Structure formats: C-alpha cells, structure tokens
Image: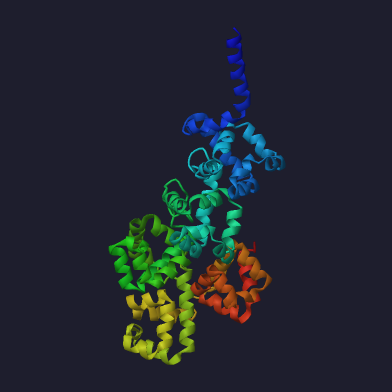
C-alpha cells in the first residue's frame, strides 16, 4: 500500500512540476485544418488586422507573445491568448512559425477584413503603375528601406493595411503571385468596372488606346495577331511607347493583364463601329479627345501658315515622309496627336475640310479643350495624397528634377500630359489651383 501511495505521489509531483510545460508539447499534434484550431487562427488574423501596433511589434519579434512585460503592457493580447489556447500554446512552442501561419491568411471566404485589404492593394497598384511594375519585377522591394523611402505612398499604404504588410514581409514573392490570382478572379470588381466600357472614364482610355494603335500600325498588327505580347517583357522592352502608354492608362493595362485576347477583340469592334462612326463628330458624347486634338490642330495651322497652306492644297502631304522630314514641327505635332494623325491617314481631304469648317466656327462650342487634362491631374492627386500635399505646399516642385526623380509616378504622369507639364513651368500655382477646382477640390 505504501509502495502504491509513494508511486502515486511521485506521479502527482511530476505532473505539478512539468504541468506548465505540457502545453508546449500540445501544438506538435495540432491539426490546423480541424474546425477549432482553424477558427482560432482566423480569429488571430482578425486580431492582428484590428491591432496594427501589436501586429507590427510581433512581426519584428514574434517571441514578444511570450514576454510577460509585453503582455502586461498590452492587455488585449493576453486576453485574446487566454481565450484561444491553440494559439497561445503554439506561440510557446514556435512563435515565428505561428506568426508566419497567421500571415499566410486566406483572403477568400470568411475573412472580410483581409479581402477588403486585398481590394485596397489591388486599387493601389492600379493607381501607382510605376510602383506596381517594380514590385512585379522584384517583390522584395516591398521590404527594402531605400525603396520605401523613395516611394512614400507605399509605406503609407502598408502602415494602414497590416494584413498586406505582414503578408509581404512573410513571403513577398508568393504574395505578389497571390495578388495576380486575386486580380484575375471573376468575383473581384476590376478597376473602373471594366465589364462596362460605356463608362465615360474607361471608354475615354479605350478610345485613346485606339488612337495610339492607329498611329502605330505595326504595333497594332502585332497585338491583334498575338494579344499576349502586351504582357511579354521582351516585347515591352522593345516598345517603350507602349509601356509609357500603359503606365499612364491603368484601365487598359489591367484589362490586357486580365484578358488580353478578349480586350483586343473589344478593341477590334470599337475600331469597326463607334470609332468610325464618331469621326468628325466632335460634339458627340465621349469625343472630347477628338475635339481637343482638333482645336490643337486649328491652332497649329494658325501658327504655321506655310504648312497650313500646303496642306489645304494637298492634304495627303501630311502622310508624306519627305514632307514630314522637311517640316519637323508637323511631324512632332502628329506624333503627339494620334487622333489627328489617324484622320490624315484615313481621309486627309475629309479631315482638312472638317478642320477648316471647325476653324470657321461651324462646330464651335464652349468646351474647354484642356479640361480633361486638369480633371486627370485632380484624379492623380486624389490617388497620390502625399504628392498632392507636397505640391499644395510648393507647386513648383512639379518642375523640380530632384522631386520628380524621387516621385516617379508624378514624373510619368506629366510626361504623359505634356500640356500640364508646360503649364506647371509657366505658372505652377495657377495650374494646381485650376486642377483642384476642376472637381471641386478634395
């Protein structure tokens, strides 16, 4: 009897001595796919999303989840852990592994917070094509201090979206691949609702792409034959004009990335129908770009009477290589105005007739030809708050080479909008104020 009692006492003593360590052995057998552990992990991901300061500290040092000082200073964390024994014991055994598992969160069903952050990041990438391109080429830049300091919009976004930030820190390459899957998912609302290209903004980009292709028939033919070339890095490296256009037109860029073949078919239908039907109809809805370029053409003719006179006599000279080589201002104008260039190629006599009628006031309207430029600048500033604040403080920064090199999104935008670039040089403050007034400020 004494021997039994002594054995029992020894067992109890062993349990009391080592009982505090038993939970550390438990996580080895945790099946995270089973209902209870899975629910706890989902709760932990939500906890991290709603507690960004704690999440950031744990990302820096996961072992803090076991630090009594840290737990005492952040009582919400021990309260959570005490109510979630699987998470608590898993941290005791493998803190880094537990946090990594949490960071590999599923953005699909049952996780609305992460899903919302994924949508926000998708929109951020669309609004920041230069940053997006760099991250696609090298995802690890999302964790590079130099890159972040040179692209302040990105760290500002990441600090406000802990799930995206933690996912990039855990596996930047894998997460960027996950973003591609997210963007191509049919359930995700795409930039600008690309299922409805009747939308004014989207249709405007689509029309601009049509003009861009009309002025580059070789490129247009290549993309029609093989739309996937629009996403081929080797092909893009040989066509910088296409890269610049896509960076300045995120709706078109995203459409080509999501479904290049379908989008090029849509472009073909546009070319055969609405584009042809709208030629010369500057006052028709959605034809503001045509009107703007036509007004620019009228001004060009007034400023270059010798060229204008030659073209009135023989409009087809606008497509003559010899004539263009001898009249560089005309060649430069046409390169910068794809709609006018395409009209001369399609029907030089008809376009000159329409342009002269327009100049005579037969189709004049109160339309401001540069209103779309200022509206685009206003939208750019809405999507780039840090840059906007810097310009509001000192508008002349838009003409500073150092500032533009540090803020490539602004540099690329201005290169795609030469009129605004020139206006900033002439009067930066007035240009900025007009952009702010174009949509009532923000």
Q: In this view, does 77 lie above or below 19?
A: below
Outermost top residue: 1
Q: In this view, does 23 lie above or below 228?
A: above
The percent position of residue 100, horizontal first and vertical second, equals 52, 44
Outermost right residue: 73
The quarter of the picture where residue 271 lies is bottom left
Given residues 14 and 25, the one toward you in this image is: 14
Task: Name the side, left or right, on which 304 lies relative to 149.
Answer: left
Please indicate, yes or no, whether residue 237 appears anywhere in the rendered image: yes
The percent position of residue 15, horizontal first and vertical second, equals 60, 23
Is the image coloured rainbow, by chain, by secondary structure, or in one colour?
Answer: rainbow
Image quarter of the N terminus:
top right
The percent position of residue 18, horizontal first and vertical second, equals 60, 27
The percent position of residue 111, horizontal first and vertical second, equals 53, 40
Q: In this view, does 118 lie above or below 314?
A: above
The residue drawn where x is 50% and y is 63% is 131
The residue drawn where x is 50% and y is 54% is 122
Please indicate, yes or no, whether residue 211 appears anywhere in the rendered image: no
Image quarter of the C terminus:
bottom right
The residue drawn where x is 49% and y is 65% is 130
Given residues 298 and 341, the one toward you in this image is: 341
């Amino acid at each position: 009897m004494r021997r039994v009692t002594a054995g029992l006492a020894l067992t109890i003593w062993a349990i009391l001595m080592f009982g505090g360590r038993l939970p550390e052995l438990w996580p080895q057998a945790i099946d995270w796919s089973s209902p209870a552990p899975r629910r706890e992990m989902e709760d932990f991901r939500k906890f991290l999303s709603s507690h960004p300061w704690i999440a950031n500290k744990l990302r820096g040092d996961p072992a803090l989840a076991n630090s009594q000082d840290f737990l005492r200073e952040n009582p919400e964390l021990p309260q959570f852990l005490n109510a979630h024994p699987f998470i608590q014991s898993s941290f005791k055994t493998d803190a880094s592994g537990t946090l990594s598992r949490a960071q590999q969160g599923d953005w699909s069903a049952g996780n609305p917070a992460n899903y919302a952050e994924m949508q926000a990041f998708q929109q951020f990438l669309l609004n920041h094509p230069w940053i997006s391109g760099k991250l696609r080429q090298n995802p690890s830049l999302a964790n590079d201090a130099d890159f972040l300091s040179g692209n302040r919009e990105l760290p500002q976004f990441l600090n406000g979206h802990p799930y995206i930030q933690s996912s990039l820190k855990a596996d930047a390459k894998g997460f960027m691949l996950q973003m591609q899957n997210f963007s191509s998912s049919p359930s995700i609302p795409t930039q600008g609702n690309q299922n409805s290209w009747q939308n004014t903004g989207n249709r405007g980009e689509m029309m601009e792409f049509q003009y861009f292709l009309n002025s580059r028939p070789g490129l247009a033919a290549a993309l029609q034959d093989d739309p996937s070339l629009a996403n081929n890095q080797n092909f893009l490296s040989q066509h910088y004009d296409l890269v610049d256009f896509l960076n300045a037109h995120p709706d078109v860029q995203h459409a080509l990335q999501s479904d290049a073949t379908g989008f090029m078919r849509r472009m073909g239908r546009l070319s055969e129908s609405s584009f042809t039907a709208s030629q010369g109809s500057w006052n028709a809805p959605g034809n503001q770009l045509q009107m703007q370029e036509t007004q620019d053409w009228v001004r060009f003719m007034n400023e270059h009477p010798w060229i204008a006179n030659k073209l009135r006599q023989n409009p087809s000279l606008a497509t003559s290589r010899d004539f263009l080589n001898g009249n560089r201002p005309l060649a430069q104008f046409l390169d910068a105005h794809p709609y006018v260039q395409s009209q001369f190629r399609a029907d030089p006599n008809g376009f000159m007739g329409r342009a002269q009628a327009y100049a005579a006031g037969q189709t004049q309207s109160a339309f401001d030809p540069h209103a779309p430029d200022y509206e685009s600048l206003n939208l750019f500033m809405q999507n780039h708050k840090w840059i906007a604040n810097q310009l509001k403080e000192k508008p002349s920064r838009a003409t500073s080479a150092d500032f533009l090199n540090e803020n490539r999104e602004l540099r690329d935008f201005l290169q795609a909008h030469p009129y605004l670039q020139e206006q900033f040089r002439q009067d930066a403050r007035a240009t900025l104020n007009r952009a702010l007034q174009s949509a009532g400020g923000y």
